[in-house]
Image (cartoon, rainbow, N blue to C red):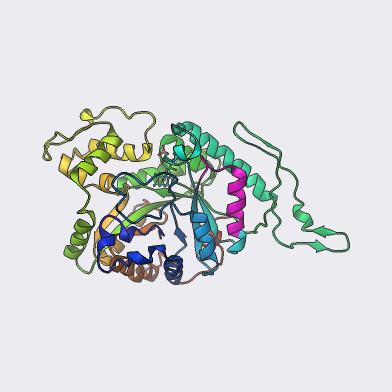
Amino acid sequence: MTLAPTWLSGDAWRREDSQVERLSDPRFFIELAQRAEAAHLDFVFRPDSLGAPPPGMAKRPGGSGSDPTLLMTLLAGHTSHIGLLTTASTTFFPPYILARALMTLHWLSGGRAGWNIVTSLDGQRNFGLDEMPSAEDRYARAAEAVQAIRALWQTCPRGGETIDRGAGLYDSATVPEPIKFEGAYYQIEGPLGAMGHSAPLPLFQAGASDVGRGFAAGIADGTFAACPDKAAAIELRADLRRRAEAQGRPADAVRVMPGLSLFLADSEAEAQELYRDTHAGTSRAQKLAKLTAMIGLDLSDWEGTRNITAADLPPLAKGLRSRTHAELLHRKIARSQPTLDELLAAPEVLGSAHWQVIGTPGQAIDAIRDWADEGAMDGIILFPGGSVPCLDLTLATVPAALAEDGRFRKGYEGRDFATHLGVAGQ
Ligand SMILES: Cc1cc2nc3c(=O)[nH]c(=O)nc-3n(C[C@H](O)[C@H](O)[C@H](O)COP(=O)(O)O)c2cc1C
């Protein structure tokens, strides 16, 4: 489940019962992690942003820029089993710093850290750059960083595996040697002086362009996927399975975990109302601006009832903020020729292109069963939306119902993140 408080998103924070005041209280996040652990979830997840909030967000609750790895370290001390999936960018953080912070979280949490590897959407001006490096360059850098980080992790002592006082040897099996890493982007001598942990540290990735998929297929144990519909998820999962095998890994090496945005209430009508209220404050001009940024076409003088087709679209520009999101929008237009009004209400424009269920818990559970049966996913990342009652309903119903029909655990079988996911040694 996400720790980005999506149930406060849009206008939801303005509700009387939003508890938005608690957003600045670290105990808010501790309670969330403990509730997710009580539901036996594999992990809590925190995305990250190194850039300014998007225009129009200024009047909404912030905090998304707080360091997710430090937050996870706090949660490690207040939980015992749940995985702690943090997000960190290889575009802006040097590998040595990443390797050290992630392995320290892993050690402190007893093997529960995971890393969502991102190459970032923006933030360049906070790091002395005018332009974002190209996606190709960012992924090449990411691949090299992961290689170096894994080598650095190999040098970490596991903590007293062999202590021979007589011979003066501590952890003789892992006497740290320099790694002498020489790459195109990084030169790192090593070793890393941090304590290690014997459990593998699961790697996730987000970004599903051609180059992003190639990167995931080579190194990731899981991918955080934006899949607004089942066909998109089936295509992504089948493609990642093929690509993983082509790179000499098992077909199921990369678990596809779509984000699932949930607007749940006791009746479908209430859920629809919750969704409408959440997005009521997003103006047509804001939606049009987002659409223009993604497809490179200004539709502000179009009638809302006019259909848009693939022929209306210019080719995808280079240097897009997220090629994944732009491609998803292109795909939607090519497949369904929506009207402009329909497009402006779609999750690809209104949200982050995630799979969305607006309805009762029963409808959400049926949709999850359907996607799982159709080979569209290996797991999900829950994004409760619109209200605290929706968050409560999600945690109270979805995991238990899936556990009841054997699709999800009834209790933890291990204490480290890799065991929850079924990830073998790296
Ligand atoms: C579903 C999804 C979630 C992402 N989450 C983050 C994030 O939390 N922080 C971040 O800096 N970048 C994030 N990204 C950006 C990606 O890491 C990547 O830089 C971007 O999508 C460009 O890669 P692409 O060309 O493969 O789309 C995310 C991308 C996707 C598709």
Residue 145, x across and y down, in percent: 58, 40
> Residue 60's spot in the image, x, y percent?
31, 54
Which image quadrant is residue 385 in? bottom left
Magenta span main SS: helix
Q: Is residue 390 magenta?
A: no
Quarter, ligand 1: top left
Task: Mark yes or no: residue 70 visible.
Answer: yes
Q: Is residue 93 magenta?
A: yes
x then y, percent, for residue 300 = 17, 35
- Quarter placement of the N terminus: bottom left
- Could you tell whether 48 is left or right of 261 in the image? right
**What stretch of residues is rendered in magenta?**
89-106
**151 w.r.t. 165: above or below:** above
Q: Residue at x 22, y 53 (%)?
A: 279
Q: Residue at x 44, y 65 (%)?
A: 29
Spot occupied by residue 417 in the image (x, y as percentages of width and height) = 53, 60
Residue sitting nearer the eye, 337 or 48: 48
- Residue 134, above or below 39: above
